Amino acid sequence: MRDHLRGLAQNPSTPVEILKSLAMERAADIRSHVAKNPSTPVEILKSFAVLKNKDVRWGVAENPSTPVEILRSLAMDDNEWVRGGVAENPSTPVEILKSLAKDEVGGVRGGVAENPSTPVEILKSLAKDEVGGVRGGVAENPSTPVEILKSLAMDDNEWVRSHVAENPSTPVEILKSLAKDEDGSVRGGVAENPSTPVEILRSLAMDEDRDVRRNVAWNVSTPVEILKSLAMDDNERVRRGVAQNRSTPVEILKSLAMDKSVLVQSGVSGTPSTPVEILKSLAKHEDGLVRNGLAWNPSTPVEILMELHIEAYFSE
């Protein structure tokens, strides 16, 4: 049940004593999840920041609770993924973002591009970057000005257009146009955008592409009547999307908690809006995937998190 440990390591509701225990795990993937956890004590983050394992340093670089002096140091790390983590971090100071915006690695510049703390003048420059991933970062950034979003909505790269489609700052007229895009990932971006008008969501809820329907199911702005319909979709991933939606009514969650698919049930167990009584019931589920959802859920009661921590070791 290593998945339990990974979930507990990244869950912001996990008690500090468990995080301290997980920080001593030999497995780097567990420690990297602890490193990303905003509830992890600063002394652990400081010790992790100088470890040889790049994945652990990367986790520290991404953590919004990481002190600025550590971010400054990691911004000069030899590893591009670590620098990229600093670039994405909303707590990173502007002067560091300005420097990383000139990094030779596109992935690092892309991190700056998607950072909501990045100044507009830098976003304007990165919107012209030759690397599609960088332009895509600007496209998904909620701080990007409308005139730039309009330009990127016509980008030849479908990945860039899909991020414009996902951006809650994108104007409705652009969303209407992108909802008709021939690429499913672009329509899917519109489908999950909380700013998308209801009439477009209704249309996309009937899209032949299951991923588009799943994204409508995820959308917190999707009306209840559409969620009720999608909760009966033939595709389990669509039903799971409804289960993961924090706007889904309790009666639908109760029904999905008894779905024939454990994938759907795990969606219910991992959803923060699921009532405690349902979480307690799913904690007794025989399938580890369903219980694992509880390990990641910040609404899971502490006593269940403690039980999952013990279970992870006894099941090895």
Image (tube, rainbow, N blue to C red):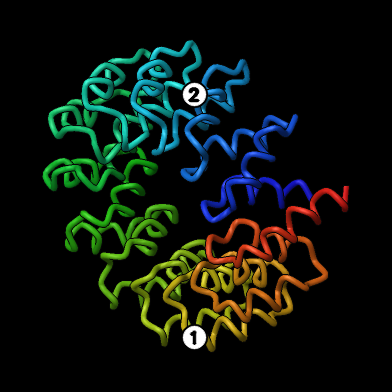
Circles 2 and 1: CB distance less than 8 Å?
no
Q: How many neighbours does mark 1 have within 10 angstroms: few (below 14), some (14-19), or many (20 or more)?
A: some
In this view, the residue in front, 121 or 212, is 121
Tag shown at residue 77: none
Residue at label 1?
Answer: 228
> Which residue sits at x=66%, y=46%?
6
Q: Is tag 2's residue or tag 1's residue first in the polypeptide sequence?
A: 2
Q: How many neighbours does mark 2 have within 10 angstroms: few (below 14), some (14-19), or many (20 or more)?
A: many
Label total for image: 2
Q: In this view, does 248 lie above or below 7?
A: below
- Alpha carbon of mark 2 to alpha carbon of mark 1: how far? 41 Å
> Which residue sits at x=75%, y=61%?
307
Residue 82: x %, y % from top left: 48, 23
Residue at label 2?
Answer: 81
Relative to 232, 22 lies left or right: right
> Which residue sits at x=74%, y=58%?
308
Q: What element carries label 2?
A: helix
Quarter of the rendering containing residue 53 = top right
- Which amino acid type corresponds to the residue marked 2 in the rendered image? Trp
> Which residue sits at x=22%, y=33%?
118
In this view, the residue in front, 20 or 99, is 20
Q: Is mark 1 on a helix, strand or loop?
A: helix
Q: Which of marks 2 and 1 is in front?
A: 2
In this view, the residue in front, 120 or 10, is 10
Residue 96: x %, y % from top left: 27, 21
- Which amino acid type corresponds to the residue marked 1 in the rendered image? Lys
